[in-house]
Image (cartoon, coloured by chain):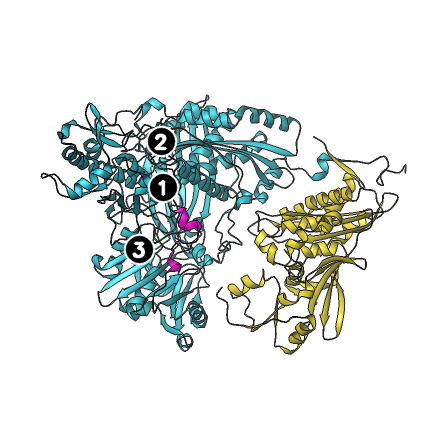
Chain colours: A yellow, B cyan
């Protein structure tokens, strides 16, 4: 790697990291480095100071606690991929992890780092949105939780303060009749999403959708919520027609751009398709329906 | 060799050295003498060092005092350079020099010839012609300092409008790419045509049926895993320039280097060490090599230049970029009467295509393919654009890939038009197996072939009829995944080439082998070709083992060093086995001839009574098989007891000028599933039957086929070097230039037939490129086949989900997830519908 020279700091605790962020001039945080290192290598990022948090052992966790699934800032994609807890209870996380980049990147890259990068093509932001998740940050004034909806501002830009460190991403633990899924369209292994949709559905005792969450990847300037689609779902019973309507509403809410991998119109249509697929999986995982392919 | 047709062009060399009692190895037997000769799956000699990380690549080379070169590149595709200021870079501690075109002009090194006799700036003199073109070079004590220094070089540009599309470039008001050339008033480079225009037109006028299709063979990059690089080392004591470089053709590069630099050729040494894949990318000379050499010459220290991945994709030789229109004239029952093709070729900013100089469009005129077609006509126009120069033969024998794509796609288009099975159209038109040697309408002399046999085998392996049945069933049931079956029955023309036809920069395309047997009975074979992963060190040793009855482990193959190897033209265009492999066999037979005389001396018999027994690998006295002698014993005799009438020693050299090209062929069958919701394509079955004549190492062939098929899949599905309207490369790194990984590659089922080349000393034809050439049309045929019932005739490569879905949608074949899904509700389940 032929990066420009930079100063490298290795704090061993969150408080040490935060005081470094406070005292240093315009520091950049290094976690898994799967976006930052290529940017350094291309010299698209030329930081004078890098704060490397990989030595903060207390951030290495993935657990349920206090009604949340919590992922510490050093939980790697591979940790999610390999977790039995995730397999049992968090369909969208289990779907997403193996679809992130390739195994090498998943071994090193972190979920929180991907969220912090705020690339609209990143997968985890959509999952957080669908689950009404939050990021927990630590700064000079202590800890605060930022809802995913309020976190993403622009591509690569968030509401994280300059002297703050994200320590955790968390989502509420699911109810009994709740299921989630993530569907992603990409051209090859290791490629970013052309489009992706995370869906979460919670059903009431009557079999109606009590709460719905839909997050979208790569089809807007940030990971985005499909609010109208969620509203259309809530209070209704699942059916192919309902999901078709939700898919259309999600597609309408998306705002993709054309690039060499696909036209905007195609991506919009794929939001529709992926949303329907994700909703079907989520409903099935919630035990609400069984799907049958008719041919 | 069995069933070989008569060929009047059998070379003298072969007549002389192919012994009457010895027809060469028997293809059916695959030998298996157990010595590692022809047909044995010998483990690759190269693998130990590669697998254990002991390969030596250019970037592994470190020399005392070695400096590092970083190239400053233009961010603009078309711009005049107003000023270059290197003073801030020079002020940095570890920066030794900043070179610009002015510095190179002083040493007459400012330009270099391309392989098509164009002149390319080494560092831009006056005007930038494509994005990332070489503008200046920074030489520093380490690579990091060189990179830091390059960022400090300030260049002032006057930005001009670029033109990136060939069709746009030929319009009257297009920006002029090459304003430095006298008499160049537009972006037109050359027109070329082949075949008989009038005869072809007559056939079209009279035909029952004609079909026409536009298709683009997109710009690809060979993208070898090792990028290009060089370590240049000028020795002022010996006045000698040594360049270790990523070269597929070290000797040809030595001659070119000498011509560019003015250093006499015997004072230039090119060494191509281990090379991590070439695929045609390492055939041309690139500015980086010349800059490193110039810097070493000026500074009198070794200088290393190794490019980065994006520099490799954005600036070194691309491949393809042909916009083609194909037409076929046929009878109602599918007999092809004529084929016509028109091409617009984007050559980039310089005419730097890599092909034999008499073939400005390479071997594109093989476009009649495997078919006996009476009339053919092809025309081509090449244009300059503000894109990187290229047109290299990417795992391809000089535009054969484009030609095969065209004809194999057109046969499918014709079959659809006639509502015939595409395999029936192929059978009807194949050159019959008893018609070889066959002269095509565009003048090629095909050596041998049995196309129907290969097709039959492929169809059987692929369960073709069952898949056709399944395809019909899915259409009837309106299934959400359509099935497509694609076939390609391709013919290659490889082994360039006969000196009467082929040359690179004037040098005939022979190749060479020099075989020296040591007193202890082992041997060194030096060849003029250069392996980049093809396994020459094993394959060529097997040829010698076969011809001399030696053990394959007793032969070392050396290549890549112009100080020790005999002159050769290098490795590309599947030429190594057809040309250098032939030279190795002939050199071995020459040694065998001399060995016979020594054997006679050792066995105290008359030379005419000595017989060579291929099976045992020994010489014996006629009628007395017990009185035998091996090559090891003969070697000792050659050095310790040489006959009076012979020189001591046991060695021979052969420079082999092939009498004709060789024509490997095959049939591929690809079955795909097309997702009607997303346009995604999945491979269901992939069968490849190849015929490369006699097979030397089936395992290496299998590896070649697998690699080439992977590249064919990349071509058909993923890869394209794209540009935006401002001339910015938008597909210039591996985030945007998508190479297939193991996940994108299906399970390949390979098979083979054996139709030896009648004019090649061991009946071999070359195989490295068949899969890259043959598979893209099979894949595109499969995807179009899935939709042809709705009238789809073509999908452009790369077949992105977007393109496939649009095609589905335009023909009413797209569906949404709700179209085919119903929900069931468990009796006791929460989802049970209420009565409301």
Residue A116 position in % (x across, y down): 66, 63
Query: Is residue B576 visible in the rendered structure shown here?
Result: no
When the figure is inspected, residue B658 is found, relative to residue B371, above or below; the finding is below
3D distance between C-alphas at marks 1 and 2: 31 Å
Mark 3 or 2, nearer chain start: 2
Horizontal side, residue B316 vs residue B656: left or right: right
Residue B43 position in % (x across, y down): 40, 41
Front-most of A46 and B269? B269
Residue at x 16% of width, y 36% of height = B598
Q: Which quarter of the image is occupied by the C terminus of chain B?
A: top right
Mark 1 or 3, nearer chain start: 3
* Membership of A124 in magenta stretch: no
Bounds of the magenta span? B37-64
Residue at x 42% of width, y 60% of height = B307
Residue that numbered label 2 is attached to: B32
Q: Chain of mark 1?
A: B
The mark total stands at 3
Label 1 vs label 2, nearer the camera = 2
Mark 1 or 2, nearer chain start: 2
Horizontal side, residue A48 vs residue B381: left or right: right
When the figure is inspected, residue B133 is found, relative to residue B480, above or below; the finding is below
Quick one: SS at disc 2? Answer: loop
Residue that numbered label 3 is attached to: B271
């Amino acid at each position: 790697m032929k990066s420009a020279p930079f100063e490298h700091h290795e704090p061993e605790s969150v408080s040490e990291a935060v005081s470094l962020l406070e005292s240093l001039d315009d520091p950049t945080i290094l976690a898994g480095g799967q976006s930052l290192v290529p940017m350094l290598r291309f010299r698209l990022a030329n930081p004078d100071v890098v704060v490397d948090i990989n030595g903060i052992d207390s951030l290495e966790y993935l657990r349920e606690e206090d009604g949340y699934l919590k992922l510490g800032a050093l939980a790697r994609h591979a940790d999610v991929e390999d977790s039995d807890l995730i397999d049992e209870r968090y369909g969208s996380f289990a779907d997403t992890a193996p679809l992130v980049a390739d195994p090498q990147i998943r071994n090193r890259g972190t979920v929180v780092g991907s969220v912090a990068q705020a690339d609209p093509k990143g997968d985890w932001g959509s999952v957080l949105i669908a689950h009404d998740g939050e990021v927990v940050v630590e700064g000079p004034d202590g800890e605060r939780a930022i809802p995913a909806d309020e976190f993403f501002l622009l591509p690569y830009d968030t509401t994280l303060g300059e002297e703050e460190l994200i320590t955790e991403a968390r989502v509420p633990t699911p109810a009994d009749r709740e299921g989630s899924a993530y569907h992603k369209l990409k051209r090859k292994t290791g490629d970013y999403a052309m489009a992706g949709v995370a869906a979460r559905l919670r059903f009431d005792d009557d079999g109606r959708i009590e709460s719905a969450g839909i997050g979208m990847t790569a089809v807007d300037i940030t990971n985005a919520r499909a609010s109208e689609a969620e509203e259309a779902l809530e209070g209704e019973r699942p059916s192919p027609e309902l999901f078709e309507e939700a898919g259309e509403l999600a597609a309408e809410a998306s705002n993709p751009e054309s690039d060499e991998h696909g036209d905007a119109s195609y991506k919009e249509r794929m939001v529709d398709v992926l949303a329907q697929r994700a909703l079907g999986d989520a409903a099935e995982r919630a035990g609400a329906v069984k799907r049958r392919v008719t041919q | 060799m069995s069933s070989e047709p008569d060929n009047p062009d059998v070379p003298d060399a072969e007549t002389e050295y192919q012994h009457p009692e010895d027809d060469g190895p028997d293809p059916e037997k695959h030998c298996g003498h157990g010595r590692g000769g022809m047909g044995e799956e010998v483990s690759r000699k190269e693998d130990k060092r590669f697998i254990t990380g002991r390969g030596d690549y250019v970037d592994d080379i470190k020399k005392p005092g070695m400096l590092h070169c970083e190239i400053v590149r233009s961010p603009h595709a078309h711009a005049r350079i107003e000023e270059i200021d290197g003073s801030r870079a020079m002020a940095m501690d570890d920066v030794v020099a900043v070179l610009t075109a002015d510095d190179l002009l002083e040493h007459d090194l400012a330009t270099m010839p391309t392989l098509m006799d164009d002149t390319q700036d080494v560092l831009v003199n006056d005007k930038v012609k494509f994005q990332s073109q070489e503008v200046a070079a920074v030489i520093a004590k380490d690579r990091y300092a060189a990179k830091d220094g390059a960022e400090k070089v300030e260049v002032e540009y006057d930005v001009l409008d670029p033109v990136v599309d060939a069709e746009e470039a030929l319009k009257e008001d297009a920006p002029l790419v090459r304003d430095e050339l006298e008499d160049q008033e537009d972006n037109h480079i050359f027109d070329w045509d082949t075949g008989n225009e009038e005869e072809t037109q007559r056939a079209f006028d009279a035909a029952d049926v004609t079909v026409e299709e536009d298709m683009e063979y997109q710009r690809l990059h060979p993208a070898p895993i090792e990028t290009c690089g060089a370590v240049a080392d000028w020795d002022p004591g010996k006045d000698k320039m040594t360049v270790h470089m990523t070269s597929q053709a070290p000797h040809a590069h030595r001659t070119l280097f000498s011509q560019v630099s003015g250093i006499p050729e015997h004072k230039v040494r090119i060494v191509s060490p281990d090379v991590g894949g070439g695929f045609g990318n390492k055939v041309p000379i690139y500015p980086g090599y010349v800059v490193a050499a110039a810097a070493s010459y000026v500074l009198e220290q070794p200088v290393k230049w190794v490019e980065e991945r994006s520099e490799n994709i954005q600036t070194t030789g691309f491949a393809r970029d042909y916009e083609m229109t194909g037409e076929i004239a046929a009878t109602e029952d599918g007999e092809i009467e004529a084929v016509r093709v028109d091409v617009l070729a984007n050559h980039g900013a310089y005419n730097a295509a890599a092909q034999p100089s008499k073939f400005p469009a390479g071997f594109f005129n093989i476009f009649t393919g495997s078919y006996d077609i009476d009339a053919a006509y092809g025309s081509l126009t090449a244009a300059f654009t503000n894109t990187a120069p290229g047109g290299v033969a990417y795992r391809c024998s000089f535009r054969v890939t484009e030609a095969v794509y065209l004809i194999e796609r057109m046969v499918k288009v014709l079959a659809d038009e006639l509502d015939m099975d595409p395999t029936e159209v192929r059978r009807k038109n194949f050159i019959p197996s008893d018609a070889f040697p066959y002269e095509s309408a565009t003048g090629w002399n095909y050596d041998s072939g049995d196309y129907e046999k290969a097709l039959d085998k492929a169809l059987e392996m692929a369960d073709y009829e069952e898949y056709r049945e399944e395809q019909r069933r899915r259409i009837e049931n309106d299934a959400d995944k359509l099935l497509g079956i694609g076939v390609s029955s391709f013919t290659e023309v490889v082994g360039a080439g006969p000196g009467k036809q082929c040359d690179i920069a004037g040098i005939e395309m022979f190749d060479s082998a020099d075989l020296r047997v040591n007193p202890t009975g082992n041997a060194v074979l030096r060849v003029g070709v250069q392996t980049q992963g093809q396994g020459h060190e094993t394959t060529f040793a097997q040829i010698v083992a076969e011809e001399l009855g030696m053990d394959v482990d007793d032969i070392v193959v050396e290549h890549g060093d112009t100080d020790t190897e005999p002159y050769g033209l290098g490795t590309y265009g599947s030429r190594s086995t057809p040309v250098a492999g032939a030279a190795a066999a002939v050199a071995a037979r020459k040694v065998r001839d001399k060995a016979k005389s020594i054997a006679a001396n050792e066995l105290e018999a008359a030379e005419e009574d000595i017989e060579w027994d291929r099976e045992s690998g020994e010489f014996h006295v006629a009628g007395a098989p017990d009185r035998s002698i091996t090559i090891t014993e003969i070697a000792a005799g050659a050095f310790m007891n040489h006959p009076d009438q012979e020189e001591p020693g046991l060695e021979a050299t052969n420079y082999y000028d092939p009498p004709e090209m060789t024509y490997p062929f095959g049939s591929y069958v690809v079955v795909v599933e097309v997702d009607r919701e997303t346009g995604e394509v999945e491979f269901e079955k992939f069968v490849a039957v190849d015929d490369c004549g006699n097979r030397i190492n089936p395992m290496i062939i299998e590896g070649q086929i697998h690699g080439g098929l992977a590249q064919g899949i990349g071509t058909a599905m993923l890869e394209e070097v794209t540009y935006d309207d401002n001339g910015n490369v938008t597909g210039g790194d591996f985030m945007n230039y998508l190479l297939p990984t193991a996940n994108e590659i299906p399970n390949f089922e390979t098979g083979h037939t054996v139709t030896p080349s009648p004019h090649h000393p061991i009946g071999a034809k070359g195989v490295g490129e068949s899969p890259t050439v043959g598979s893209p049309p099979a894949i595109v045929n499969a995807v179009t086949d899935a939709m042809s019932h709705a009238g789809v005739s073509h999908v452009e490569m790369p077949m992105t989900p977007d393109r496939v879905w649009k095609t589905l949608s335009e023909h009413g074949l797209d569906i949404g997830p709700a179209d085919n899904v119903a929900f069931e509700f468990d009796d006791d389940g929460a989802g049970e519908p209420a009565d409301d």
